[in-house]
Image (cartoon, rainbow, N blue to C red):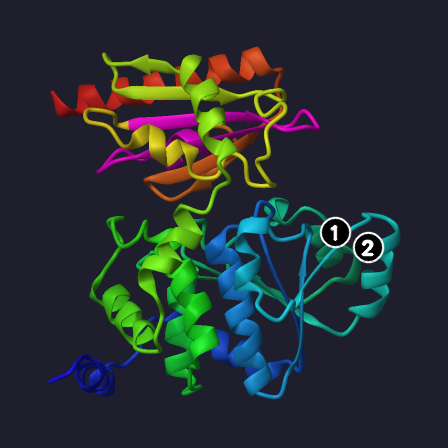
């Protein structure tokens, strides 16, 4: 049996079973016009989910607008292959124009259940009293408008399942963007939430003729050459703690001086730091041009970095999390390091 026949055979027997799918379907059926959005600092999973859902809703003859707070990162513009993503350029002038336009729309938030991570879009929800739901796979407190299933490794897998549940056929363009989000948030099928369903989804998507090697390069290996110079600078000042098993790097405002790094300078660096033996946690604290501090955390196995991020108002997956810190740089760094060490001490105590 060839791959195409095998895929069709398996999919004929597959029935989507997540309890959130009928809830999403009901919300879609009750509304005519939709705004789709995702969190600030949009990643492949968030962008792919909203673009794929856009095409699903258009198939159902709905009016749909994708509206984010930021322009998509340069490396990920291929996901928005028909330039459907709008973004609020000016918080006052542009925001007011969108507010006047979106009076009669329902909102679907993709890959995020915390309104504060929507930035200016959260103001739209408040100002217009918008009826909204979230479709997400991250663990958050249960609320009636949060349609969350943590068994999925990626929100794009939920959207793939929704296509099947609502019997909407896929095409090659949609398959490409779903596959991009799926490999990104599953760590190219390495993370522990990767399941048979994940591989079934990937198998079907690949049958549309996706070049999996090229897609991997687009997601994980498309950085400019100056990225190597940046890595050299960061590794010089990196902190490696072999006793606790963590590595900590810092990207200050001037770290990319005179380098051509595009708009995704630090994407994936924290994963590189984790890719050595005996390291349980990798952390990267980033100081933006505006002076804001962000921390990305990655871990292996049962080491839950989401618990560390939650102490600073952040969150995420067990093995991939992050937070924003409203503190002076040195103080923030000290707190993050202390948080990592205290967590690892607790893990060690539990194992004894």
Q: How many marks?
A: 2
Left or right, residue 277 beside residue 285: left
Front-most of residues 171 and 141? 171
Q: Residues within 10 Å of mark 2 (few under 14, many from 20)?
A: some
Q: In the rendering, at what x and y percent does residue 68 appear?
A: 66, 56
Q: Does residue 56 appear anywhere in the picture?
A: yes
Q: Does residue 139 appear anywhere in the picture?
A: no
**At 82% across and 48% down in the image, what residue appears?**
90
Say if the magenta span includes residue 308.
yes
Circle 1 residue: 123
Front-most of residues 103 and 266? 266
Left or right, residue 161 beside residue 278: right
- Measured along the vertical axis of the image, is residue 18 above or below residue 350? below
- Measured along the vertical axis of the image, is residue 61 above or below residue 290? below
Q: The N terminus lies in which quarter of the figure?
A: bottom left
Q: In the rendering, at what x and y percent does residue 350 appear?
A: 18, 24
Circle 2 residue: 95
Q: In the rendering, at what x and y percent does residue 8 appear?
A: 23, 86
Left or right, residue 333 beside residue 201: right
**At 40% across and 19% down in the image, what residue appears?**
235
Contact between labelled residues 2 and 1, with CB atoms less than 8 Å apart: yes
**At 30% across and 59% down in the image, what residue appears?**
151
Say if the magenta span includes residue 278.
no
Mark nearer the N terminus (1 vs 2): 2
- Measured along the vertical axis of the image, is residue 27 above or below residue 333? below
Q: In the rendering, at what x and y percent does residue 16 appear?
A: 31, 77
Magenta region: 281-310
CA gap, disc 1 to disc 2?
9 Å
Front-most of residues 19 and 268? 268
Q: Residues within 10 Å of mark 1 (few under 14, many from 20)?
A: some
- Measured along the vertical axis of the image, is residue 49 above or below residue 16? above
């Amino acid at each position: 049996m060839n791959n195409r026949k095998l895929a069709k055979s398996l999919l004929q027997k597959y029935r989507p079973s997540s309890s959130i799918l009928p809830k999403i379907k009901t919300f879609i059926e009750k509304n005519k016009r939709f705004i789709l959005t995702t969190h600030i600092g949009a990643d492949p999973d968030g962008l792919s989910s909203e673009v794929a859902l856009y095409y699903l809703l258009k198939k159902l003859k709905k009016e749909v607008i994708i509206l984010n707070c930021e322009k998509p990162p340069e490396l990920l513009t291929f996901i928005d292959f028909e330039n459907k993503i709008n973004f609020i350029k000016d918080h006052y002038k542009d925001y007011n124009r969108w507010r006047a336009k979106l009076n009669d729309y329902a909102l679907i938030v993709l890959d995020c259940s915390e309104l504060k991570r929507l930035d200016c879009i959260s103001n739209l929800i408040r100002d217009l009293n918008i009826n909204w739901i979230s479709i997400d796979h991250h663990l958050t407190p249960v609320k009636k408008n949060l349609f969350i299933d943590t068994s999925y490794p990626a929100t794009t897998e939920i959207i793939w399942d929704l296509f099947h549940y609502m019997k909407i056929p896929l095409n090659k363009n949609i398959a490409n963007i779903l596959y991009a989000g799926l490999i990104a948030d599953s760590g190219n099928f390495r993370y522990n939430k990767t399941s048979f369903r994940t591989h079934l989804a990937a198998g079907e998507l690949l049958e549309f003729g996706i070049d999996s090697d090229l897609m991997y390069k687009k997601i994980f290996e498309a950085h400019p050459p100056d990225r190597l110079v940046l890595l050299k600078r960061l590794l010089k000042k990196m902190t490696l703690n072999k006793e606790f098993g963590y590595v900590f790097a810092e990207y200050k405002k001037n770290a990319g001086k005179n380098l051509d790094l595009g708009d995704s300078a630090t994407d994936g660096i924290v994963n590189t730091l984790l890719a050595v033996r005996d390291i349980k946690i990798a952390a990267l604290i980033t100081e933006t041009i505006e002076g804001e501090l962000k921390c990305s955390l990655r871990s292996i196995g049962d080491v839950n970095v989401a618990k560390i991020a939650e102490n600073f108002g952040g969150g995420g997956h067990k093995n991939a999390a992050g937070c924003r810190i409203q503190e002076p740089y040195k103080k923030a760094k000290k707190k993050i390091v202390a948080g990592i060490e205290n967590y690892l001490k607790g893990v060690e105590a539990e194992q004894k």
